[in-house]
Amino acid sequence: MDVFGAVAEPTRRAVLDLLARRERPAGELVAAFPTLTQPAVSRHLRILRESRLVDVRADGTRRVYSLRPGALAELDRWLDTYRRFWDDRLDGLERHLDAKKSGSVRRRTK
Amino acid sequence: MDVFGAVAEPTRRAVLDLLARRERPAGELVAAFPTLTQPAVSRHLRILRESRLVDVRADGTRRVYSLRPGALAELDRWLDTYRRFWDDRLDGLERHLDAKKSGSVRRRTK
DNA sequence: CGCTTATATAATCTGAAAGTTATAATTTGG
DNA sequence: CCAAATTATAACTTTCAGATTATATAAGCG
């Protein structure tokens, strides 16, 4: 599965959101989705692994997952082609600069 | 179908790529995919319409499709959360500025 | 060692997505 | 009007992603 397919799934985006804050062992991620079974989450993690969106490191029996930067950059590059369609008022650049200066995550503008 | 799901499909991304250069009637888009039938492409166009990624305008019997900026901005906003993970070397900003200055589409860096 | 804990994999089921053929709807030109 | 052209929709089939249950694998602990 490619990166586009990987992030198309809401649960997987939620996993990425959790990992964006901090790395977590698989069990914690399983617990974060009470409506899903452990194998279901494990399968999502496998897909995220295979599409290079996350890293895993062993810690005893635990498997600690962390976000992996590179893969999402592919999405960003794809968006480059289209960015000019809404970017002409420089909003995107302003957001970009703002995010960098403050070092924090920008809130939605609208 | 949401925007993430819409762009997850390779054919639909190819349609967006074609529309990024210029607007095109449905028939031209159908012709661009010789391995698919007309209804198959028409269905993809419907999905792109419903997810607000394209606009349609009637021209006689023709239906002229064009790219619609707003929807992809949602993807861009989602990426904002993760951008800092690969943006620390300022590459993303440089690309951003470069693309704006040159007014052209940046080639892949690697 | 076994037993428990943590996670992954296998086998299977199910529903949704995407493709096909056939047909409808709409506009235009003669 | 009628026929051709263009596009959309309907009905159906097939493929595939995502879920479940059951089981395997592997590490830590008494």
Image (spheres, coloured by chain):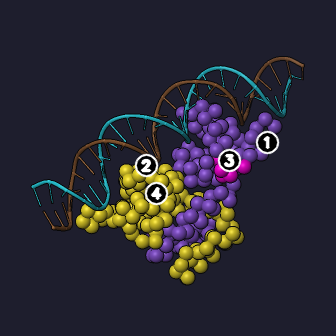
Chain colours: A yellow, B purple, C cyan, D brown
Tag 1: amino acid: Ala
Where residue B50 is drawn, which disc sits there?
Answer: 3
Q: Which residue is mark 2?
A: A1
Q: CA distance from mark 4 to mark 2?
A: 25 Å
Q: Which residue is mark 1?
A: B58
Taking the magenta stretch, the answer to whether it contains residue B49 is yes
**Toward which corner of the image does residue C24 lie, by quadrant?**
top right
Mark 3 and mark 4 in contact? Answer it, CB < 8 Å: no
Protein chain holding label 2: A
Few, some or many residues within 10 Å of mark 1 (<14, 14–19, 20+): few
User: Dot 1: what SS?
Assistant: strand
The x and y percentages for residue B67 are: 68, 52
Q: What residue do we see at 52% from left, 53% from top?
A: A8
Residue nearest the observer in this picture, C26 or A48: A48
Q: What residue do we see at 52% from left, 80% from top?
A: A103
The x and y percentages for residue A90 are: 67, 72
Tag 3: amino acid: Glu
Protein chain holding label 1: B
Q: CA distance from mark 4 to mark 1?
A: 48 Å
Q: Which residues are magenta?
A: B48-55
First reached walking from the N terminus: tag 3 or tag 1:
3
